[in-house]
Image (cartoon, rainbow, N blue to C red):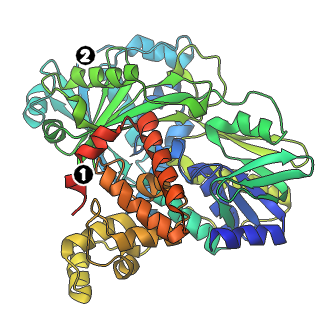
Amino acid sequence: MTRSETIARLRARPQAAVLVIGGGINGISVFRELALNGVNVVLADKDDFCSGASAALSRMVHGGLRYLENGEFKLVRESLLERDRLLANAPHFVRPLPTTVPIFETFAGLASGAFRFLGLTRRQSRRGAVVIKIGLTLYDFFTGGRRALPAHQFHGRRSTLTRWPAMNPAALASATYYDAWVSRPERLGLEMLQEAIAAGGLALNHAAVVRSDEGLMLHDRVGGEEVAIVPELVINATGGWIDLTNAAIGATNQKLMGGTKGSHLVVANRALYEALDGHMIYYENEDGRICIAFPYLGNVLVGSTDVRVDDPDAVRSGADERAYILQSLAVVFPSIVIADEEIVFQFAGVRPLPASNAAATGAIPRDHFCELIEGAPPVLCMIGGKWTTFRSFGALAADMALERLGGGRMVDTENLPIGGGKDFPANPTAWTDAAAKRTGLPRARLAALLERYGSGADAMADAAGPDDDIAGYSRAELAHLVATEHVEALGDLLLRRTTIGITGTLSLAVIDAAAAILAEAKGWSAARREAARDDFLAELLTRHGLDRATLASRDQRTIA
């Protein structure tokens, strides 16, 4: 359904059972749950789908080993269950990730860990072998009944430094356990969105919800028009923006949120990539803050920070956070030096945490819950949550909405494949060989399409063609995404529908090529196209640390 068709349907029938505000992963999740259960539901986001915190996650799909210290056992158990469900339901994007913890002390953290568990302190501290062993044993215990991934193992000093020779030689040992990672979280969100639309839901990105004298209105930030909407229930799924959204729609001025900022760097350093040996290194900085480094689409993703924020719209990855992340990396890999030009992308997002007076950010609960604000209409706020648990959080909010509306559940999503995860081949190599014979396309091209679209690669192969001349994508492929996936701005296409931005293959030439494709599809004038280009360049500079000189230097590497 096109944008104009969606707006026309809303204008013709403004009544809706549920209006979901916020097109991040949690908002899309509850939107999908409700649409699949036959509810007349509308979703709106003031920016693009999955463009806020849902685009700034650590790319981990995990139970939250650290949360055991705070006694959040229920959250860890639920997260591990949802991790395993994602491994089964989204195998095209979610895969196992061997994770290794370097150990530098034996008994450190025992007393402080006990105090944190009892609520007597929230101060971070170093963790020794005994504390790590206890945590990993509990981690395995929570998955013992299904064992989707291998149990943890400990390695002595010699085997640790033999396997990871660049690791700090002060390491006494290491422990390896398994979690998972997600390659394209924004695309997974989009696939769920498309499923919900196919089931009858209506969705608009770049559409802000505001209150006027006539009631709630959808303000189309693309075309400028406003459309009235009359929902029986509003679900506020805007994460770190929940308080701002409630104020904008006249729900309440109560402070519900108290988010923290997490920053990450994408590093193109071959020595670091090889030093990881295919594992995520899950380590702690000298202040006890947990950090990560793992191979991500040919580079290394390193993070993160945990800084309180008051204004989610002002979140940026600053120079101090960049320095902190690099300093933390030097603790575990002291011989590897990261040059400035090797940082090919950076991003920051707001963790949607509940309001808290905790002295330490690590002590703020990571669990999720819903809070209902009575009014006209009533507003159900989705508070907290982590990316891994989006499905169960969406199901919780949907069940509360269904109860409020007097309906019942017909479809459960626990074991429902997502998008290209349905009928995903058990043997990708065999699929690629067969597809190459069937289509005549190069095997490398088909393998890339399978990674990007899962079982949707068959249909995309017909639309995209054999070429990959724009940072690994073809002009036909990008044009198809613009035509079918709600693309309204360059950032939608180059940062979220594709991985061109985060992998460091973005350049001025790529931006110009994409702008030409978008302008042709949208009928933009030359002035409109140039304005879109300038807006995107400003976004790259302020949010992702990419200036024109850096982008220009990449031109010859990204356009064939």
Residue 190 makes an appearance in the image: yes
User: Is the residue marked by circle 2 packed among few (<14), some (14-19), or many (20+) residues within 10 Å?
Assistant: some
In this image, 288 relative to 523: left or right? left
In this image, 407 relative to 156: left or right? right
User: Residue 555, which numbered label?
Assistant: 1
Q: Nearer the viewer, residue 37 or 502?
A: 502
| For marks 1 and 2 on the same chain, the one whose residue lies earlier in the sequence | 2
- In the rendered image, which quarter contains the C terminus? bottom left
Q: Nearer the viewer, residue 221 or 114?
A: 221
In the rendered structure, are the residues bearing label 1 and label 2 in contact, judged by CB atoms less than 8 Å apart? no
> Residue 472, percent across and down?
27, 62
Give above or below for 254 relative to 421: above
User: Is the residue marked by circle 1 packed among few (<14), some (14-19), or many (20+) residues within 10 Å?
Assistant: some
Label 1 sits on what residue type? Asp
Label 2 sits on what residue type? Glu
Name the residue carrying label 2. 105
Circle 1 sits in a helix, a strand or a loop, which is it? Answer: helix
Circle 2 sits in a helix, a strand or a loop, which is it? Answer: loop
Q: Nearer the viewer, residue 17 or 8?
A: 8
Give above or below for 321 relative to 456: above
